[in-house]
Image (spheres, rainbow, N blue to C red):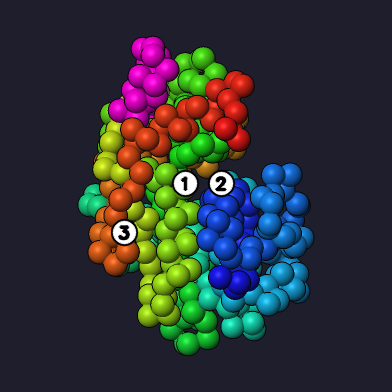
Amino acid sequence: MSEQIVVFGFGPVGRTVTEQALRQGRQVRVAQRSQPQNLPLGASFHRCDVLDAAQVLAAVQGASQIVIAIGMAYLGEVWKRDWPKAMTHLVAAAEAVGARVVFVDNLYMYGPQTTPLHEDMPLTDHGLKPAARSHVTRIWQAASQAGRIRFTALRAPDFYGPDVGQSQLGDVALGAMGRGKSAMLILPPDVPHDMAYVPDIGRAVCTLLDAPDEDFGAVWHTPNAPTATPRQLLEIAARTLGRKLSLTTLPLDLLPVMGLVSPLMREIAEMRFQMRTPYRVDASKFALRFWSDATPFEVGVPATIRSFMPGFNKAA
């Protein structure tokens, strides 16, 4: 393949999409504000701020497909202000060059639910961050329904994976265990909670890049390993390390109090509706159309914890 893919954002998902697309023989251009130090061999880089329409349009010149994997500061006011502007620029740029778009999204826009999340659930305006995701969904769906662009969204729950520090199972959980310390969880340890493995998200993105236009204009959920509790995942990590699990948890009701001094805790407190009850994601639509063999936790968790261990050779 020689088509040009532009990947906006080089966080954990953008990086794995870039690496997998390169292995498939695609040309990949990474676009974000600063050049990554670990840009894979073969990928090009274009400096771009998604809040600048001209820069976004310049970044997508010659592209046949676009992957949106950007992250913003985890602040509701920032999401409310910047996400609609960024999506408007990305949609306009894709329309201008005729490129298809795969948007790596989360599941916030469903709001509080008591049943497994499915793609047809209505959008919510419950809370700043969920409302912001609903807003950007309406932007791209309106453009798609009007026939202006070919656009699809891939939604994933909380994710984990090698070198993924900013996640519920990241630095303070599996990362801490890999460094010989106790794990800490904000998620209630014994409430079932679906997790997506970052390489599986990258695989799903590349699957959609290969999909026909008929599969665009839709929402898809990333396949995940069978639902488990956070404690079960940390127990796998403990067995990998050959020791007993040492775990500290934070009561959810304490988060608003901690939020008085910690902006991050204040933002996490808004999302407690995703943590109080079993959090399950229905990915049967994607499984029936494409594939369902998500990476088992017995494979993904050891790979993740090894990446945090001092002296681990990532190139080996």
Q: CA distance from mark 1 to mark 2?
A: 7 Å
Figure check: 16 above or below 30:
above
The residue indicated by pointer 1 is 198
**Marks 1 & 2, CB-CB < 8 Å contact:** yes
> Can residue 265 be spotted in the picture?
no
Question: Which residue is rendered at x = 34% and y = 48% of the image?
Answer: 294
Residue 47 percent location from the top left of the image: 77, 60
Q: CA distance from mark 1 to mark 3?
A: 16 Å
Residue 108 percent location from the top left of the image: 42, 54
Packing grade of label 2 (10 A; few <14, some 14-19, many >=20) is many
Residue 64 percent location from the top left of the image: 59, 76
Figure check: 190 above or below 55:
above
Residue farthest bottom in this picture: 147
- Horizontally, residue 11 falls left or right of residue 170, namely right
Q: Relative to the observer, which residue lies in front, 20 or 59?
A: 20
Image disc number at residue 130: none
User: At label 1, which amino acid type do we have?
Assistant: Val
The residue indicated by pointer 3 is 291
User: Magenta residues, as a range?
Assistant: 232-253
The residue indicated by pointer 2 is 12
- Horizontally, residue 18 falls left or right of residue 103, namely right
